[in-house]
Amino acid sequence: MKNRQWLLARRPQGTIQDSDFQFVETEVPALSAGEALVQNIMLSCDPTQRGWIAMDTYLPAVKIGEVVRSIGAGRVVASNNPDFAVGDIVSGLTGWQDYMVVNAKGQLTKLPPGAPLELAMSALGMNGVTAYFGLLDVGRPVAGETVVVSGAAGATGSLVGQIAKIKGCRVIGIAGGTEKCRWLTDEAGFDAAIDYKAEDVPARLKALCPKGIDVFFDNVGGEILDAALARLAMRGRIVLCGGIANYNATEPPPGPKNYLNLVVQRGRMEGFIVLDYMPRAGEAIVALAGWVQSGKLKNKVDVQHGLENAPATLRRLFEGRNEGKQLLRVAE
Ligand SMILES: NC(=O)c1ccc[n+]([C@@H]2O[C@H](COP(=O)([O-])OP(=O)(O)OC[C@H]3O[C@@H](n4cnc5c(N)ncnc54)[C@H](OP(=O)(O)O)[C@@H]3O)[C@@H](O)[C@H]2O)c1
């Protein structure tokens, strides 16, 4: 059996290029005792992968020549390991490849039989856990407060805004384009949306948040973070989830101009990484599953196809072309 793999060929400069990677075909290795073979079915595309291939972050950088790191879900197709049965559906860091060999329990997590894969890899997966703890544990919103979310139509942001609504907050989303903004207000239940590509964000925040922003959940950074800093309410909280506006920067971005407003408003700005919350993931998944089932939480997924399209599909995140969670199906 052949295994197609995307290897890292060089560290990206600016926007990721197909030539940053090498598409190779190798033999699937024979299994040794204690090993199992997993066939990837679906890959998760995440902005953080741009960081993983560029430098050491909260995980060591992928080395040149290594398979590109990616969250994925797949099926056990052969096993010499009692912890993995043929047919089990598992998820974890499966990488940009058709097949991976596992040898240890804990390397991949078993999904419950029949779990819808798209849901397990979005609202009930890493993005759901990020949104849940980032908003509730770091942002600590209180009913009646004003919550603003950037990257609001994306995998994480769309869940953050809807959880804030469930918790009784007034929610404003910032996203790129009329259609994404329409989806936020008409379908995801946000109170208002700002199209940062067409509107004056500081002016719209001033109009929509006359008493200031109590919680700003930031996925984007840059000028949008600066605009939110300027409108922070007294004791406002800024949750730093990510800063995609600067992930492709070739020079260090300028610091936020309006950070001293944290002093004036006695504010708090705090970053977090979802990995720290994994021991408590079950708590989030139970709550999220309940909201999905009752129709309170809408989950949008955008599924592209074919392992050969992995670099192009990852790039969609940086072009704002993904509509909800970006997934890549690589096998049936
Ligand atoms: N801290 C953690 O543990 C953690 C975990 C997961 C994700 N994250 C972070 O959360 C953020 C969202 O990730 P996600 O997986 O949910 O992706 P996503 O929001 O589904 O996709 C990325 C979105 O970013 C927006 N974007 C791209 N370039 C931009 C720019 N220059 N300025 C403003 N917006 C831009 C695009 O939306 P528009 O069309 O609206 O521009 C795009 O759809 C990222 O920063 C990611 O690194 C952090």
Image (cartoon, rainbow, N blue to C red):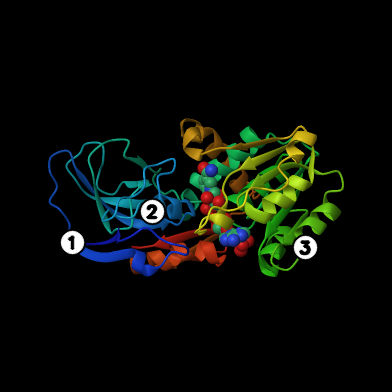
Left or right of 298, for residue 75: left
Dot label at residue 26: 1
Q: Position of residue 143 (x, y in %)?
A: 77, 37
Q: Position of residue 299 (x, y in %)?
A: 58, 54
Q: Position of residue 222 (x, y in %)?
A: 64, 54
Whole-angstrom CA distance, mark 1 to mark 3, is 51 Å
Looking at the image, in which quadrant does ligand 1 appear? Answer: bottom right
Dot label at residue 71: none
Corner quadrant of residue 167: top right
- In the rendered image, the vertical position of residue 6 relative to residue 265, given as above or below: below
**Tag 2: amino acid:** Ile
Counting residues from the start of the chain, the first of labels 1 and 3 encountered is 1
Q: Residues within 10 Å of mark 2 (few under 14, many from 20)?
A: many
**Tag 1: amino acid:** Thr
Which structural element holds mark 3? Answer: loop
Residue for badge 3: 200
Residue for badge 2: 53
Q: Residue at x 44, y 40 (%)?
A: 58
Which structural element holds mark 1? Answer: strand
